[in-house]
Image (cartoon, rainbow, N blue to C red):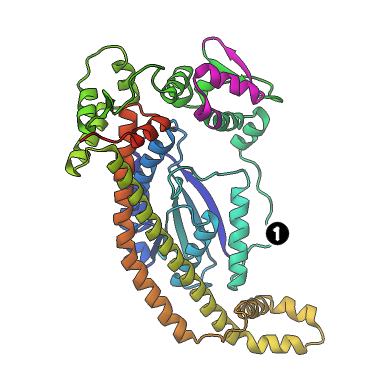
Amino acid sequence: MAISSLYPRKTMRNRQRFMADRLDYDQKAEKTIDGDLVSSYMCLPESAAEEFEASKKLYFLTTGRRQDPAHDILMYRIIQSFKPGEITPEEANRLGYELAMKFTKGQHQFVVSTHVDKAHIHTHIEFNSTNLNCDGKFQNVKDSAFILRELNDDLCRVHGYSVIENPKPSAKKQKEMAAAQYGSSHKEQLRRAIDRVLPDSRDYEDFLAKMRAEGYEIKEGKGLSFRAPGWDRFTRSDKLGSDYTREALRERSAVRRGPSAGAKKPFQRDGRKVNLLIDIQAKMAAGKGAGYEHWAKIFNLKEAAKTLNFLVDNGLTDYDELTARAEQAGTRFDTASRRIKQLEARMSQAAQLKTHIINYSKTRDVYAAYQKSRHKKEFRAEHEAEIAQHEAAKKAFDDLGGKPIPKVAQLSQEYARLLAEKQGQYEEYRAARQDMIAYQTAKRNVDKILGLTPEQQEQNREQKPER
């Protein structure tokens, strides 16, 4: 029978090294027939750890959110296991890929590695907790494991593989029972409320006012605490992670507030635009006066130096040009990503249709006997898998809308052509992704270094340079 499990991955050590170790283990040559049983989505198996890490850096730059390393989930592992002798390794890998695509809805990178070193064939799926847009993370809700099992069971039934019918419910883990009893899930609820309210707040006091409007009671003593309606106790914000202490929240709201009224607009000096490189160098060379210390806390000088080097190497001295290149890089990445998704979707359709054609041919006689049987209920119980395969194939043929059913050879040729195009397109995808991350990171760093708010960025674009 086919079973599945879901496991979150987190670590207190170097996260990229940790992800690389896990992925390297999954892809061991002796387990995957020299890597032939490894497939991936929106990443290359050999560089998946680096690509996962890049998305996490871009996530932080995009959202400003960073979790305590002890609670930060880097990726999730799914294990899909099959009854010995029931499935071929190649088919197991394809089903693992299909399960990962359905479960993540195509919004997360993943690597699928099928192992044949045990008596039972099983597949390890590792997917990135950060989504493809780098603006959110996978939400591991209470019923995620149940949803995964339902998807896995449905997938296996369609392809004629056995599943565990009516599984016994497992006992709650001690940690889950404690969460239900003491409401530790309040932390996640409070964290999400803060992340939703803070970006629209003018300052720290406005943030507190908005939290009260959301229904939270607020208590300020040694720390900052919140209590929502229905909660028995207050929850301290510093228990949510280093980005949620009172000092961190004051700092995050101050960053969003921008310069005080009457201050000179960034990028403008005496009504003229100032060269980006000059402004950044001046900021980095600033003395230890008021303002410098606060800026140094929210932006690392080393990152400022990297940004300056990037601008010099790419001949960028104008903010408008930097913005345009960042937008172009994003558009190029979106185009390549969209094409790969189209190819992936058509490849999946071709593979499924090929399976249905083969299954239809194999089960035709059984289904004909079922149609003629005078004891259909008993006959179906005895031949449930074959009948399910035949009916699934018929439905797939009906969905063609009257179009002729293609030959298996035609589908195999189409799949090979699509795979070749996908492999070629992936080189463009990787290059576009690297450009997008580089230019968008540089732009966000410039905005941070010079304290630009969205309104000031727009004003800078409207201000024309004097010749």
> At x 23% / y 27%, what residue is drawn?
279
> In which quadrant will I find the N terminus?
bottom right
Judging depth in this view, the residue of 347 and 18 nearest the camera is 347
Quadrant in which residue 440 is drawn: top left
Query: In the picture shown, does residue 289 fall above or below 161?
Result: above
Q: Please identify the residue farthest to the right as the structure is shown.
A: 374
> At x 30% / y 50%, what residue is drawn?
434
Judging depth in this view, the residue of 308 and 133 nearest the camera is 308
Q: Is residue 369 left or right of residue 66?
A: right
Confirm whether the magenta stretch covers residue 261. Answer: no
Residue 343 in the image: state x and y as whole percent. 43, 68
Residue 126 in the image: state x and y as whole percent. 44, 53
Q: Please identify the residue farthest to the top as the structure is shown.
A: 221
Is residue 353 at least partly visible in the picture? Answer: yes
Q: Which residues are magenta?
A: 196-222
Residue under label 1: 166
Name the amino acid, label 1. Answer: Asn
Query: In the picture shown, does residue 19 fall above or below 304?
Result: below
Quadrant in which residue 28 is drawn: bottom left
Circle 1 packing at 10 Å, graded few (<14), some (14-19), many (20+), is few
